Amino acid sequence: MVQNFYLKVAKMVEVKGSVIVDTIDAIKGKFGDEVYNKILNNLNENDRKIFGNLVLDLGWYNLDGFVRLLEQDVSVTLNGDEKLLIARSEALFEKQLKGIYRFFIKLGSAEFVIKNLSLVHKTYFRGVTIDVKMESSNRAAVRYTGFEKQHRIIGFSIIGFFKKALEMSGAKDVNPYYTTSIEENKGYCDLAIMWSGK
């Protein structure tokens, strides 16, 4: 029993506080405090305490709680349409990729961007590994290991992240899609990315 507890704790996936802060700021900025409070009220007591108080940029938080926040955000502000989270994530990541992570975007080099985005994502998640394989000059495969079935909504944000980063590097017709999804619960998910241009 004790051994199983430690294994479960060791597997916990965490998300960087800065991701949560940016998400909360984006919700409040677009919809106001009243809508954010409605989202908070739909959460369990523990999550309300965390996301209703100061979230530290440099802190680490359980990804399960952040997923529940995103699910309520989608329910309240996007009428339950999770796919709209891709476009919202693109806008959020564009700000980050023009800011502190701008050195990961190299105009005209999609390969450079893809290979280095795994370094960016390692700063966002703890308990998740990311492997990138260039399959051709216009196709890559990215494997995330560590996400669990309940983290499936994060998959939409990942698509938005790669799509925006590649478009900012000058790639055209960017098409990221899952060949193995998070909800398949295999312990990993595989994202295929295709594009045209440089």
Image (spheres, rainbow, N blue to C red):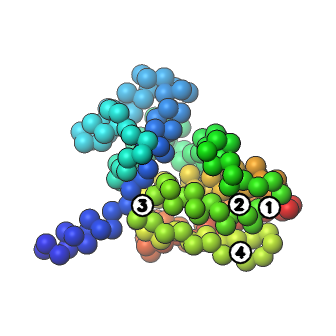
Query: Which numbered mark, 4 or 1, is in the foreground of this view?
Result: 1
Residue bearing mark 1: 109
Q: Nearer the viewer, residue 119 or 9?
A: 119
Mark 4 or mark 2, earlier in chain? 2
Mark 3 or mark 4, earlier in chain? 3
How many numbered discs? 4
Give SS at disc 1.
loop
Q: Amino acid at mark 1?
A: Ser
Residue bearing mark 3: 126
Give SS at disc 2.
helix
Left or right, residue 83 beside residue 98 = left
Expressed as whole percent of the image width and height from the top left, the position of residue 128 reads 45, 66
Is the Cβ of the residue at disc 3 closer than 8 Å to that at disc 4? no
Give SS at disc 4.
strand
Residue at x 26%, y 65% (from the top left corner): 9
Residue at x 81%, y 72% (from the top left corner): 137
Give SS at disc 3.
strand
Q: Nearer the viewer, residue 150 or 6?
A: 6
Mark 3 or mark 2, earlier in chain? 2
Expressed as whole percent of the image width and height from the top left, the position of residue 165 reads 70, 52
Cα separation between marks 3 and 4? 24 Å
Q: Amino acid at mark 2?
A: Val
Cα separation between marks 1 and 3? 28 Å
Cα separation between marks 3 and 2? 21 Å
Mark 4 or mark 1, earlier in chain? 1
Q: Residues within 10 Å of mark 2 (few under 14, many from 20)?
A: many
Residue bearing mark 4: 134
Is the Cβ of the residue at disc 2 closer than 8 Å to that at disc 1? yes
Q: Is residue 159 above or below residue 187?
A: above
Q: Amino acid at mark 4?
A: Met
Residue bearing mark 2: 113
